[in-house]
Amino acid sequence: MNGNGFYRSDPARFSAAWWVEGARNLLWVAVVTILIWVYADMRFTDRRALIATLRLTAPPASKLALISRNDVAVDFIERRVQFKVEGSRERLDRLEREFHDAVVCDVTRDYGTGEHAVNARDVLNADPQFANQGLRVISTEPASIPIRLDRLVHQDVPVELVVSGAELTTLPQAPSVGVMALENQWKTITEQTPSPVLKTKQVDLSTLPVGKKVEVEFEIFPQIADVPVRLDQNTVKVPIEIRQQTAKKSFTVTVRVLAPSEWDDMRKYELVKKDPLEWRPEITITGSKTDLDKLDPKDVDAYVQLREDDKKPMETWIARAVTIRFPPGLAVQLAGEPPQVNFRLDKRPAELPSPTP
């Protein structure tokens, strides 16, 4: 090394300076190696096992509906899914800290009517929690979720107001309400009722003032002919005017049975009543006091109509609403829902031929 100190020669091998220089180099190599491994631990690929809730939806605007296992239209289907996700340790750590386990997917974007198997891994990988973070779901359990989609029909249906406790000057016309039903459900509705009508829950008007227009809110039953439907609105407001308050009267009636006129084999069947007391129900009738005073219990006709399907062997009882009719000319009506009876038709054993003398 020259006298100015700008250069120096390597220390002699195995000298103290040589060993110190070697130790210093090894220290820097160790530090760099540790830093590399720390960086790799943060940035290199790893895998984690997590659990998510997949919520599969079908928005009404799609005109499609998800069908549950009991054949009812539902807004969404949820399933818990175990999955493995792959990515850097740093991003996996962030995912575990910030992960929202509810993952929503609109299945109508990729599927139409019919039965499908939704790939759970594809749903998760499309979610921003994974797609925007450079993470990849590599497996799920279960691998797919079965769904069924059906088309929805939208129709405007008139609303029938159901009131009690008063007579109106005129029965107001409620506005029609939009309903949505599955295509096969709407077919069932129109087969049973060619002119479908929505009914409201009964509203008691007995406390409202007479001769004055009052706006009344009615809640609508979300069904037509016992078929559930979706309503655009659950209530309607209608202005009504009461002519007079009504009274109530209760009678016990006897329910009779009507068989179709074309039946010629009714003697082959025995009508079995589940509870004989059901066939003598007490009913409540509303109307003006004058008309109620004219009404005699024997003038009230209560009956159930038998159908061809009733002849089929049944494991359960047939439940049927009783039809109630009143004499013409009397402004009276049944208060509430009609009573129901339970019965079945049992085929009588065949008669043995008489022995020949």
Image (tube, grey):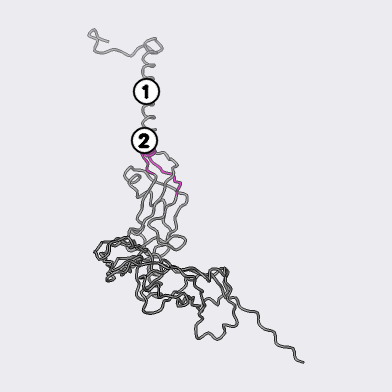
Query: Bounds of the magenta span?
Result: 80-100
Residue to which mark 2 is pinned: 90
Which quadrant holds residue 197? bottom left
Q: Upstream in the sequence, badge 1 or badge 2?
A: 1
Q: Which residue is mark 1?
A: 31
Furthest-bottom residue in this view: 357
Front-most of residues 58 and 208: 208
* Residue in front for this viewpoint, 329 or 15: 329
Q: Return the x and y of residue 238 as percentages of the image width and height.
A: 27, 64
Q: Nearer the viewer, mark 1 or mark 2?
A: 2
Mark 1, residues whose alpha carbon is within 10 Å: few (<14), some, or many (≥20)?
few
Residue nearest the observer in this picture, 129 or 202 = 202
Task: Give the residue displayed 52% in from the left and 71% down from the top.
Answer: 280
Whether 94 is among the magenta residues is yes
Disc 2 residue type (three-letter): Glu
Q: CA distance from mark 1 to mark 2?
A: 21 Å
Kindly identify the amino acid type of the residue bearing the numbered disc 1: Val
Magenta-span inclusion, residue 181: no
Query: In the rendered view of the protein, which quadrant contains the C terminus?
Result: bottom right
Element class at badge 2: helix
Residue 71 on image: x %, y %:
44, 63
